[in-house]
Image (cartoon, rainbow, N blue to C red):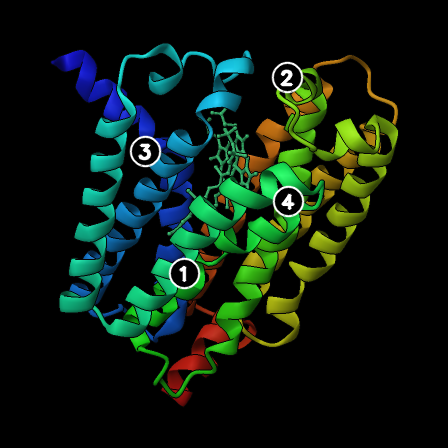
Amino acid sequence: MAIQARDYWTLTKPRVVALIVFTALVGMFLAVPGLPPWQETVFGLLGIWLAAASAAAINHLIDQRIDKVMARTAHRPLATGALRPVQVLVFALALGALSMAILVRLVNVLTAALTFASLIGYAVIYTGWLKRATPQNIVIGGVAGAAPPLLGWAAVTNMQGQWDWAHALLLVLIIFVWTPPHFWALAIFRREDYARALVPMLPVTHGVAYTRWQILIYTVLLVVITLLPVAIGMSGVFYLGGAVVLGLVFLWYAWRLLDPPDEFFAMRMFNYSVVYLMALFAFLLVDHWLLPWLPGAGAAVGGLDFQRVG
Ligand code: HEM
Ligand SMILES: CC(C)=CCC/C(C)=C/CC/C(C)=C/COP(=O)(O)OP(=O)(O)O
């Protein structure tokens, strides 16, 4: 019984989904001055978490064949037979239905609709189609994984606030451009897995050297885009400092990856990509929320302007 609970938990990709939910939380806090309304925040996060977990479980269901073939995923509950497909289907549908009920009843219909679109985008369009169809799979499919800050924003404002919700799209853009370096670093290391499973990931179809250059291009783009929140007055110097330091380290990884010291370097870059996104969003949050309260910090921070507007 305990083992089954652990298997169901594994289906939800808990660590990936935790970071997804955190980016939604940051979207919520940046959407309004002060604290966002508690009901929309709590139930919004719960609904987004359940939807992402449902999408992750559907991904396990659709990817059974692939997961069995790849060393990284061969231990997953469906691949080993620890869970039956019908159990996973019922679990995923239950999580998805619960998510929609919570979002529609306790948050708003717009957030439910956008979250549902993200769920379908990842679980059906990316997993069921793009992943098998094109090496641009993760670029296009990345939209679904990037959406959560917008979902969080929608949850607490219903897109009706005075504040320009297009700022939420900038947060989405950051995750969207972060996804290729995040994933392709791992795909370089795991390319034999993907080749064996006949999944057309970029290092398999276009080779490792080409993928390394693509990673560098996206990383440069990412670092430039992460400066935009400051350029448009959405974030201040605290965020700027964090984004620059984190970005320089990411750039160093991408540059070094062109001629890596060993075969594990791509995996170290992948691990850093996760730390990077987590820390970048933490800087956005702290900058927005804490800095206006620090003596002397106000003038440099978008947050104070924000309060005047609000
Ligand atoms: C199309 C988009 C994406 C693809 C293809 C992708 C792919 C992957 C893969 C293959 C792994 C390794 C998982 C494992 O070995 O279990 C991974 C790990 C991870 N991803 Fe992504 N990812 C994407 C988007 C995202 C997004 C949007 C986030 C969060 C905002 C995210 C956060 C993470 C985290 C935190 C891990 C580490 C999980 C762990 O340590 O167990 N990913 N990703
Ligand atoms: C509603 C909502 C916000 C949905 C978000 C969807 C979601 C869970 C996105 C995570 C992206 C991810 C882990 C992709 C890896 O899939 P993969 O199949 O390429 O990786 P795998 O081989 O590890 O399964």
Q: Which of 149 and 38 is in front in this view?
A: 149
- Count neighbours of disc 1 (C-alpha within 10 A) and say few if under 14, some if 14 to 19, many if 20 or more: some
Q: Which of marks 3 and 4 is in front?
A: 4
Marks 4 and 1, how far apart at CA: 17 Å
Which tag, 3 or 4, sits closer to the chain's start? Answer: 3
Query: What residue is rendered at 41% in x and 89% in y?
Result: 309
Query: What residue is rendered at 20% in x and 36% in y?
Result: 90
- Count neighbours of disc 3 (C-alpha within 10 A) and say few if under 14, some if 14 to 19, many if 20 or more: many
**Residue named by callout 4:** 137
The spot of residue 223 in percent (x, y) is 71, 53
**Residue named by callout 3:** 12
The spot of residue 185 in percent (x, y) is 69, 30
Which tag, 1 or 3, sits closer to the chain's start? Answer: 3
**Residue named by callout 1:** 117
**Residue named by callout 2:** 193
Q: What element carries label 2?
A: helix
Q: What element carries label 3?
A: loop
19 shown above or below 115:
above
Marks 3 and 4, how far apart at CA: 21 Å
Looking at the rendered structure, the kind of residue marked 2 is Asp
- Count neighbours of disc 4 (C-alpha within 10 A) and say few if under 14, some if 14 to 19, many if 20 or more: many
Query: What residue is rendered at 52% in x and 73% in y?
Result: 167
Q: Nearer the viewer, residue 241 or 280?
A: 280
Q: Nearer the viewer, residue 149 or 117?
A: 117
Ligand 1 within 8 Å of the CB at mark 4: yes
In the rendered structure, the answer to whether residue 245 lies left or right of residue 216 reads left
Residue 82, by quadrant, is top left
Query: What residue is rendered at 78% in x and 12% in y?
Result: 262
